[in-house]
Image (spheres, rainbow, N blue to C red):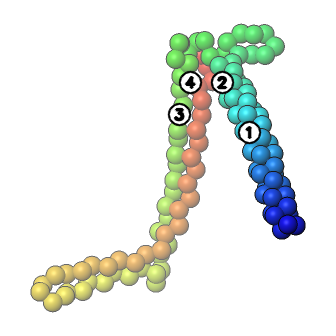
Amino acid sequence: MLLKVKGQSTVEYAILIALVSAVAVGFLSVGLKGAIRGKNQQAADYLLKAGIDASTGSDQLAPYGATNEVPLYTQEVSKTQVKGGDDYKSVSVLEQGGAEKKLQLQTTESGAVSVETLEGNNP
């Protein structure tokens, strides 16, 4: 007789724990969805107010037209220097069938700078 009562009690506890955890997961999912919705609204408000001076309220991007596209200019400068001396090798190999393979080996040193600038003056 005690085995039936003990088994029934264990099943009742398992059902109770499953029910409590399901309710907790439900509340957490509702809270998480609300937090995500709030952050999404916050990001949209941030993007919509981009370019507005907080102290004066004036739109800094207005001179660029309705699309608010600010011109972006990219400048790149690179300098490559071939190292002379014994490092340079040029080899021609004649393979079977008449194919010729040319191999060149040299040591170079390159330095590069890339700068992106926004147009500072009104168009």
Of badges 3 and 2, nearer the viewer stands 2
Residue 63 appears in view: yes
Badge 1 crowding class, 10 Å Cα cut-off, few under 14, some 14 to 19, many 20 or more, is few
Identify the residue under disc 2.
44
Residue 70 numbered tag: 4
Give the x, y percent position of residue 68. Answer: 56, 18
Gap between marks 2 and 1 measured at Cα: 27 Å
**Residue at 53% of width from left, 22% of height from top?**
69
State whether residue 31 is above or below residue 84: above
Contact, CB < 8 Å: mark 2 with mark 1? no
Residue 98 appears in which quarter of the rendering? bottom left
Q: Indicate the amino acid at tag 3.
A: Tyr
Residue 111 appears in which quarter of the rendering? bottom right
Give the x, y percent position of residue 105. Answer: 40, 78
Residue 73 numbered tag: 3
Contact, CB < 8 Å: mark 3 with mark 4? no
Residue at the extreme right of the image, as rendered: 2
